[in-house]
Image (cartoon, grey):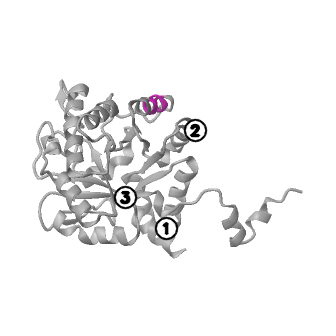
Amino acid sequence: MNRTRRLRKTEGIRRLVQENKLTIDDLIYPLFIEEGENIEKEIVSMPGIKRFSLDRIHKELDEVVALNLPAVLLFGIPAEKDDEGTETWNDNGIMQQAIRYIKKNYPSLYVITDVCFCEYTSHGHCGIIHENDVDNDATLVNLAKQVISHAKAGVDMVAPSGMMDGTIAAIREALDNTGFANLPIMGYSVKYASAFYGPFRDAADSAPTFGDRRTYQMDPANRDEGLREATFDDEEGADILMVKPALSYLDIIRDLKDKYDRPIACYNVSGEYAMVKAAAEKGWIDGERVMMESLLSMKRAGADIIITYFAKEVAKVLLKR
């Protein structure tokens, strides 16, 4: 008789035959940095996650470095917004200040910036509005300005999240033509118009003032379209391909892992984080075990990199093992 239980009998053998392992090196920690002073604001819908001004973020960054997390993904919340999001390419904007601050004071951290407009526009959409929709090609021009400004500030990688057609090609050309050919791009290659983003709107003040984002983010029903989107990013020069969200799209992560010879990232988004936190608070689940199992499922699906608000908690668990 085949007895598969022989290889489950003790902790020692289970460790030896475990097929997938989650490590600290897999994790990117998102940070929300708000323009202003003396800001340390809890995000109610994301327990444990805060918005910081630069003068208050040192304790958070000290902990990130102490836990040996390799990378952070920055989101900026400006003091002023306008129709185009012009603060995104202000060389002294909040994102640019944050890049310089972290690279100077925490040189071991790998700094990635979210490249988009929704936190910076008065209407909350991811680009220039024309006839009640985002003008794709006009937005590409502004994306190029934004990434060049981030590059000049010293960022290590840019991650464009707006889902405009031709984004990677436009950014790659802009970087290559301004002396930043070695700056990598992580594409939000397969990004769905998901209800799981809800708490992020609170975190980044980025809710649209009209309509929604379904004309540029993907229909959750579509799988083949995700492969087409990823193919465009791959051909246009993305260095890393990302799937967002993660938990409800593990099949898409697997699709990308099977097809593309590039690192695959996924974003364990705010709603996925908030659900675990809320259920754990009520005592309905073991929050730590569900956290670890959820992220392990992303690794098993094929993710090489996981962007997650759980990063610090996961690191603490792994360091105890």
Q: In which quarter of the image is residue 100?
A: bottom left
Q: Can residue 117 be seen in this view?
A: no
Tell me the number on the disc at residue 258: 2
Where does the image place residue 130, in percent across and percent down from the top left? 17, 26
* Residue in the picture at 18% in, 32% down: 128
Q: Nearer the viewer, residue 239 or 211?
A: 239
Residue type highlighted by circle 1: Glu
What is the spatial separation of the Cα atoms under label 2 and label 1, in whole angstroms?
30 Å
Image position, residue 34 (x, y; %): 18, 58
Residue in the picture at 33% in, 30% down: 169
Magenta part of the protein: which range?
A: 225-231
Mark 3 / mark 1, whichever is N-terminal? 3
Task: Inspect this view and state whether residue 158 appears.
Answer: yes
Give the side of residue 146 with respect to residue 63, left or right.
left
Which numbered circle lies on residue 71?
3
- Name the secondary structure under disc 2: helix
| Residue receiving disc 1 | 288
> The disc labelled 2 sits on which kind of residue?
Asp
Instruction: Name the image quarter holding residue 54.
Output: bottom left
Number of other residues with Cα within 10 Å of mark 1, as a class: few under 14, some 14 to 19, many 20 or more = some
Q: Is the magenta stretch mostly helix, strand or loop?
A: helix
Q: What element carries label 3?
A: strand
Q: Label 3: few (<14), some or many (≥20) within 10 Å? A: many
Quadrant of the image containing the C terminus: bottom right
* In magenta stretch: residue 180: no
69 shown above or below 198: below
Point 80% across, 65% down: residue: 6
Q: Where is residue 208 in the image (x, y as percent from the top left)?
A: 22, 40
Location of residue 315 by image quarter: bottom left
Which mark is on residue 78? none
